[in-house]
């Protein structure tokens, strides 16, 4: 069995700034310490986009600071709050596609992880996602290379509706193209996403799809809300994937809840 730690929607801000009174840097470093203490045997950490809140170089520099002592390999992905040029100022070693997009793979045991770049810097609504032909062609190649390996695909924008009207309106605009490719490949066993700031389970073309909460602020449980900037101070979380011989198990950990271990039966 192999473990993968997953964070999404970190939303790092500049020193002294907060989001609804919360410090995203403090929340993320608290969550990271919690995860590393409990799962030091994890094989990798994946950050599923919205690494920063305003895509300022200072924010990316603070993210690099937060990750400086992390002993595990880290996969960094981009979301709608990110910008590639600013990201690369802090992480210049990042491999880019010829098109400039930031997508990569990692093989963990029998599994292949594929991390996609759904950021559309020209999105008409500023926040929806898109996968251009270059990114989709790259995905096809990586799926073919995986052969019989079971594949886990990571995206920032989820390829499913969630029931949150406002968030669904700024989802992945060409998700049908993505789902068609993943379904045709016949080796994709799990999709992991962020963007929604809630824990959501669903299915995309028959493929199990899990959406994780932010370590910082969450979307209120108000399905009809059109305002996607609505946020609430609820427990921050990260995901834990168990890659087993028989499949993928997805856990979530609300790390900001007080924890007291005691037996309920004696």
Image (spheres, rainbow, N blue to C red):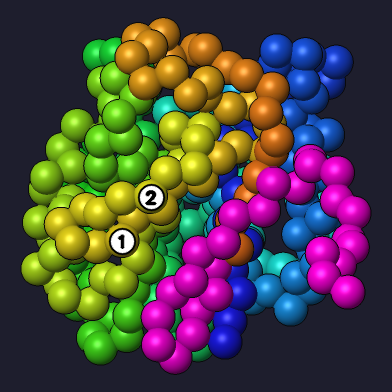
Helix, strand or loop status at disc 1: strand
Residue 242 location (% of width, % of height): 55, 75
**Residue 36 in view (yes/no):** yes
Q: Is residue 264 magenta?
A: yes
Residue marked by disc 1: 208
Q: Which residues are magenta?
A: 241-266
Q: Is residue 64 above or below residue 5?
A: above
Quadrant position of residue 168 = top left
Give the total of numbered labels.
Answer: 2
Q: Residue at x 18, y 61 (%)?
A: 206
Is there any visible trace of residue 85 in the rendered image? no
* SS for callout 2: strand
Q: Residues within 10 Å of mark 1 (few under 14, many from 20)?
A: some
- Give the quadrant of the C terminus: bottom right
- Residue 254's label in the rendered image is none
Between residue 40 and residue 14, name the one nearer to us.
Answer: 40
Q: Residue at x 11, y 45 (%)?
A: 176
Q: Residues within 10 Å of mark 2 (few under 14, many from 20)?
A: few
CA distance separating discs 2 and 1 = 8 Å
Position of residue 80 in the picture relative to residue 30 (left or right): left
Report the residue at 31% width, 61% height from top. 208
Asked whether, in this view, residue 164 is left or right of residue 107, the answer is left
x, y (%) of residue 247? 40, 80
Tell me the chief SS of the magenta region: loop
Question: Of label 2 and label 1, which has the lower sequence position?
Answer: 2
Residue sitting at x 40%, y 87%: 246
Against 189, is 55 above or below?
above
| Between 132 and 214, the one nearer to me in the picture | 214
Asked if residue 115 lies left or right of residue 48, the reply is: left
Q: Disc 2, disc 1: CB below 8 Å?
A: yes
Q: What residue would you read off at disc 2?
A: 201
């Amino acid at each position: 069995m192999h473990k993968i730690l997953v964070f999404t929607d970190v939303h790092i801000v500049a020193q002294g700034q907060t989001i609804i009174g919360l410090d995203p840097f403090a929340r993320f470093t608290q969550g990271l310490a919690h995860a590393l203490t409990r799962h030091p045997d994890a094989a990798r950490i994946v950050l599923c986009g919205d690494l920063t809140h305003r895509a300022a170089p200072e924010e990316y520099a603070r993210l690099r600071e937060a990750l400086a002592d992390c002993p595990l390999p880290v996969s960094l992905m981009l979301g709608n709050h990110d910008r590639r040029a600013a990201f690369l100022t802090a992480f210049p070693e990042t491999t880019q596609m010829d098109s400039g997009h930031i997508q990569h793979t990692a093989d963990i045991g029998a599994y292949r992880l594929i991390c996609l770049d759904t950021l559309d810097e020209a999105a008409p609504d500023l926040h929806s996602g898109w996968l251009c032909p270059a990114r989709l062609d790259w995905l096809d190649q990586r799926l073919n290379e995986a052969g019989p390996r079971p594949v886990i695909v990571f995206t920032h924008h989820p390829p499913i509706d969630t029931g949150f009207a406002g968030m669904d309106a700024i989802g992945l605009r060409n998700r049908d193209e993505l789902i068609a490719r993943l379904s045709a490949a016949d080796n994709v066993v799990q999709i992991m996403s962020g963007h929604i700031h809630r824990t959501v389970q669903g299915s995309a073309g028959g493929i199990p799809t899990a959406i994780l909460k932010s370590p910082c602020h969450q979307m209120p449980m108000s399905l009809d809300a059109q305002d996607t900037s609505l946020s609430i101070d609820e427990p921050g979380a990260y995901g834990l994937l168990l890659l087993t011989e028989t499949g993928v198990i997805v856990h979530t950990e609300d790390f900001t809840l007080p924890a007291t271990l005691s037996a309920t039966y004696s």
